[in-house]
Amino acid sequence: MRELTIALVGNPNVGKSTVFNALTGANQHVGNWPGKTVEKRTGVLRPPAARAGEAALSTTPTVTIVDLPGTYSLSAYSLEEEITRSFIVEEHPHLVVDVVDASNLERNLYLTAQILETGAPLIIALNMQDQAEGRGVRVDAERLSRRLGGAPVVSLVARRSEGIETLRKLIFVRLGQLAESASK
């Protein structure tokens, strides 16, 4: 079976590298300032652990996840935007995971809208839910999914690994759905 590729995108300082580390088991340095990741980094996405008596969710041998530089848009004005835009538009990843700061949706969803316009299969990782709730912001993931054309939305607090296994399972389920629809 061929290698599958996932692009991990989002605005600067939304926790992309934390999500990347949690999904791959890597130890990429995490900083809390914009522009920390200025090149794309890759890792192998570990499949979800199967519970006793359950079949594995995926028989896919290799799923590479690419942590792209933080960017506010796909307009190619900066090096970060060019790297991210080029990867999504020209390299056609099998799936895009857009990490979004739940406490700053308006700013973050501009990039999300641009990704949707490319037609790339998308999952929204709604990160920093704890910070949003601390500010009195409550995001309805199902409603947001409907407003974004049905793109799946997963709530996370990545720095505490909350929601990471749900995201991991959804990624493998979505890759399976995409493979199934491609074979029809």
Image: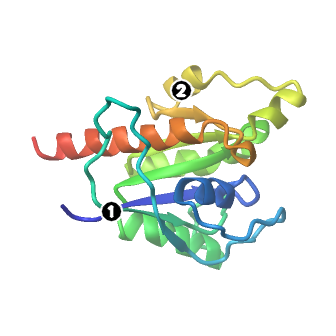
Q: Depth check: 129 or 104 in front? A: 129
Q: CA distance from mark 1 to mark 2?
A: 32 Å
Identify the element where label 1 is drawn.
loop
Taking the image as shown, residue 177 lies to the left or right of residue 96, namely left
Helix, strand or loop status at disc 2: helix
Figure quadrant of the N terminus: bottom left
Which disc, if any, is residue 32? none
Residue 41 position within the rendered picture, expressed as x and y whole percent measured from the top left: 55, 73
> Image height check: is 61 above or below 97?
below
Quadrant of res 3: bottom left
Q: Image check: 154 left or right of 121? A: right
Task: State which quarter of the image contains the C terminus.
Answer: top left
**Contact (Cβ within 8 Å) of mark 1 with mark 2:** no
The residue located at (57%, 60%) in the rendering is 25
x and y percentages locating residue 119 in the rendered image: 37, 49
Residue 147 numbered tag? 2
Name the kind of residue labelled 1 in the image.
Answer: Thr
Q: Position of residue 31 (x, y in %)?
A: 80, 66
Kindly identify the amino acid type of the residue bearing the numbered disc 2: Arg
Q: Residue lying farthest left?
A: 184
Nearest to viewer (mark 1 / mark 2): 1
Front-most of residues 43 and 145? 43
Residue 175 placement (x, y as % from top left): 32, 46
Q: Which residue is mark 1?
A: 62
